[in-house]
Image (cartoon, coloured by chain):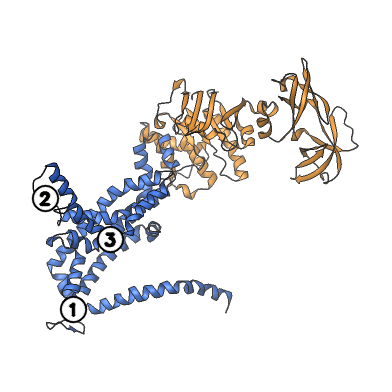
Chain colours: A blue, B orange
């Protein structure tokens, strides 16, 4: 074998374990789901093998699914916006701090050591009827009866922000950290005050990080079912809850497959638009 | 255009003092260089003038007005940073126009002045490009154009040439000096490169360890160093411990080992008194000669060549005479003296300077 052929083969040899894992654990199951979505669940509870468009017709025409899809996208968008507004200043603070950067980043990673479900459920202890907040308010005498603060859309958004904020902060931090601080000094030396220098120089240069963080928050937020399940009321179901409901509760795998592919298509489209304008490289930087 | 005055300025970072009490007066229109090794406080001093750092003590006056409490964006200074600090997301024209947008200048006027500034730095056609599309030398010129287009009271240059390669650096040195002459702006230049300082400055401020060692014209600090540090930092010097025997009207007579009596011109022996003194012998003024050469009018000693550092036009010798080593930098025409050869090292007494012992 020639040297060139050996060198050409080398990357593929190194990639093969990862490609095998991705292929077997992601690609093959995805094909199963596509195939499933064309089967049909009969009244007897058995799946009928074949090529039926019934599930797709139901998923695409029933207004119930459309409304929940839209409200899912709305909740994900609000969550992303809140994460951006809360995350940017925090990321800026970390990027500009001198000695204790490593500690601040460690603190940021700390929540990942606790299960996302546990973190979500912790809000019940804070906002629940006998939770910390109600107990404190009752003790001060501001209220006489506990207030029901849980199980509505704001608490779902709260839970999602709690879950997704670190992703936003990390992405924005990475792009802010890469910006040369003398650029802001140069801007102020030319007559811009600190706020103008930020708006003119730092903010535009950090937009790729903000966009990457935004995409991650949006996609992860729109795809979650745990948060609405734990913190939402009956009317706060998000699209992934419908998939959960169809597959786990009703055991209707064909319909669940069609619904999950629908969500995948919508979010995939968003990622494609992002990739077209900003490129995946920025996202990888933030994750690394 | 304004003068810059530092009055008893001090800068401390925690328990570390970066700049010890220092006074400095920079005349209007002067090109003044802060010269010293890294950590000498030159950049800290520049950043205090700029308003990027607050002095711990003392006063800074620009154009006669105290500016300690004036924030950087109101000081009207042009700063060129070491890494240029051009805005990567703005075109060259927008970079140059940046400062004018905060100065109530009309759009037409901005366009005219940007063009003028780009002409001044001899890059008239790059306005539409982005900084990363330019070479290092071109970026340097744009950074300069951006700093001078606002007609600053003072131009501050923080090692602006250090990121360029050697040839370009020498071109830019001439260019920078030409532009400074043309617009006549008071300029403070920071560098660790003695040849840049000697070539460009009206006055040089030599700094070391957070203190000002000497202030003077390039010729003064080079020929009449006031301290051992200055003598060694501006070119290489051989410094000999000796004794001052006599101070006459024209010369101070020093007695040094190996060479005996050396009459040092009075203007190069300021500040010494009878007793211990040091003789400064510049490496460029110490000539290697054949062991049998005629040394009339010179002071000489026998030596052996130890190391030869050949550089084409010049050669740097390390020679041993008695129990110490000397450095000599000589122009040569043909072959240098080989290592191990016996030579004479000689100098003229008027080329020496003396320091207090």
Q: Nearer the viewer, residue A266 or A284?
A: A284
Nearer the N terminus, badge 1 or badge 3?
A: 1
Q: Nearer the viewer, residue B278 or B342?
A: B278
Disc 2 element: loop
- Pinpoint residue B193: horizontal percent, then vertical percent: 62, 37
Nearer the N terminus, badge 2 or badge 1?
A: 1
Quadrant of image for the N terminus of chain A: bottom right
- Which quadrant of the structure image shows residue B257? top right
- Pinpoint residue A154: horizontal percent, then vertical percent: 17, 53
Residue A225: give its label: none
Residue A92 visible = yes
Q: Residues within 10 Å of mark 1 (few under 14, many from 20)?
A: few
* Relative horizontal placement of residue A58, taking residue A24 as reference (left or right): left
- Pinpoint residue B179: horizontal percent, then vertical percent: 54, 33
Same chain? Circles 1 and 3: yes
Nearer the N terminus, badge 2 or badge 3?
A: 3
* Relative horizontal placement of residue B331, taking residue B215 as reference (left or right): right
Residue at image point 57% right, 38% down: B38
- Given the image, what chain letter belongs to the residue carrying mark 1? A
Is B337 situated above or below A229? Answer: above
Is A151 situated above or below A20? Answer: above
Residue at image point 40% right, 75% down: A20
Residue A147: give its label: 2
Q: Marks 2/3: CA distance?
A: 26 Å
Disc 1 element: loop
Q: Marks 1/3: CA distance?
A: 36 Å
- Which quadrant of the structure image shows residue A28? bottom left
Q: Marks 2/1: CA distance?
A: 47 Å
Which residue bears the numbered disc 1? A53
């Amino acid at each position: 074998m020639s040297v060139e052929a050996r060198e050409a083969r080398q990357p593929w040899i190194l990639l093969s374990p990862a490609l095998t894992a991705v292929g077997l654990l992601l690609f093959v199951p995805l094909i199963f789901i596509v195939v499933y979505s064309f089967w049909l669940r009969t009244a007897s509870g058995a799946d009928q093998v074949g090529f039926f468009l019934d599930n797709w017709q139901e998923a695409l025409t029933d207004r119930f699914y459309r409304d929940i899809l839209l409200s899912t996208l709305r909740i994900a968008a609000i969550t992303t916006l809140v994460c951006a507004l809360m995350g940017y200043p925090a990321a800026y603070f970390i990027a500009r701090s001198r000695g204790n950067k490593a500690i601040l980043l460690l603190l940021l990673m700390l929540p990942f050591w606790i299960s996302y479900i546990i973190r979500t459920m912790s809000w019940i202890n804070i906002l629940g009827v006998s939770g910390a907040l109600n107990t404190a308010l009752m003790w001060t005498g501001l209220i006489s009866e506990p207030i029901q603060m849980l199980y509505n859309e704001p608490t779902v958004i709260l839970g999602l922000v709690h879950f997704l904020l670190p992703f936003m902060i990390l992405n924005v931090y990475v792009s802010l950290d890469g910006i040369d601080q003398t650029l802001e000094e140069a801007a102020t030396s030319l007559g811009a005050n600190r706020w103008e220098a930020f708006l003119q120089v730092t903010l535009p240069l950090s937009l790729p990080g903000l966009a990457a963080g935004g995409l991650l928050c949006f996609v992860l937020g729109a795809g979650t079912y745990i948060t609405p399940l734990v913190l939402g009321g009956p009317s706060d179901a998000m699209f992934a809850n419908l998939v959960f409901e169809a597959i786990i509760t009703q055991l209707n795998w064909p319909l669940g497959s069609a619904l999950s592919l629908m969500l995948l298509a919508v979010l995939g489209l968003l990622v494609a638009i992002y990739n077209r304008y900003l490129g995946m490289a920025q996202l990888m930087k933030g994750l690394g | 255009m304004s003068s810059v005055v530092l009055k008893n300025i001090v800068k401390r970072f925690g328990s570390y003092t970066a700049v010890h009490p220092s006074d400095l007066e920079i005349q209007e229109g002067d090109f003044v260089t802060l010269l010293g090794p890294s950590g000498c406080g030159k950049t800290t001093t520049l950043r205090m003038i700029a308003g990027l750092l607050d002095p711990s003590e003392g006063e800074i006056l620009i154009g006669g007005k105290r500016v300690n409490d004036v924030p950087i964006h109101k000081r009207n200074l042009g700063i060129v940073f070491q890494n240029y600090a051009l805005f990567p997301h703005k075109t060259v024209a927008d970079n140059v126009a940046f400062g004018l947008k905060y100065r109530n200048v009309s759009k037409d006027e901005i366009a005219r002045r940007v063009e003028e500034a780009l002409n001044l730095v001899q890059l008239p056609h790059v306005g539409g490009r982005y900084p990363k599309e330019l070479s290092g030398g071109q970026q340097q010129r744009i950074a300069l154009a951006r700093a001078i287009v606002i007609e600053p009271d003072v131009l501050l240059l923080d090692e602006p040439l250090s990121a360029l390669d050697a040839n370009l650096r020498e071109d830019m040195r001439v260019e920078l000096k030409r532009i400074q002459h043309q617009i006549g702006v008071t300029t403070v230049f920071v560098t660790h490169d003695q040849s840049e300082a000697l070539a460009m400055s009206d006055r040089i401020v030599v700094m070391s360890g957070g203190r000002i060692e000497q202030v003077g014209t390039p010729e003064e600090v080079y020929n009449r160093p006031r301290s051992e540090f200055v003598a060694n930092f501006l070119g290489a010097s051989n410094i000999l411990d000796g004794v001052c025997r006599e101070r006459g009207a024209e010369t101070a007579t020093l007695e040094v080992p190996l060479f005996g009596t050396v009459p040092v011109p009075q203007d190069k022996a300021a500040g010494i008194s009878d007793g211990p003194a040091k003789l400064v012998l510049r490496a460029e003024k110490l000539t290697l000669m054949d062991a049998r050469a005629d040394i009339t009018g010179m002071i000489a000693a026998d030596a052996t060549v130890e190391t030869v550092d050949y550089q084409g036009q010049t050669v740097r010798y390390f020679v041993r005479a008695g129990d110490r080593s000397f450095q000599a930098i000589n122009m040569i025409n043909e072959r240098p003296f080989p290592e191990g050869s016996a030579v004479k090292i000689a100098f003229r007494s008027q080329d020496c300077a003396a320091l207090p012992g």
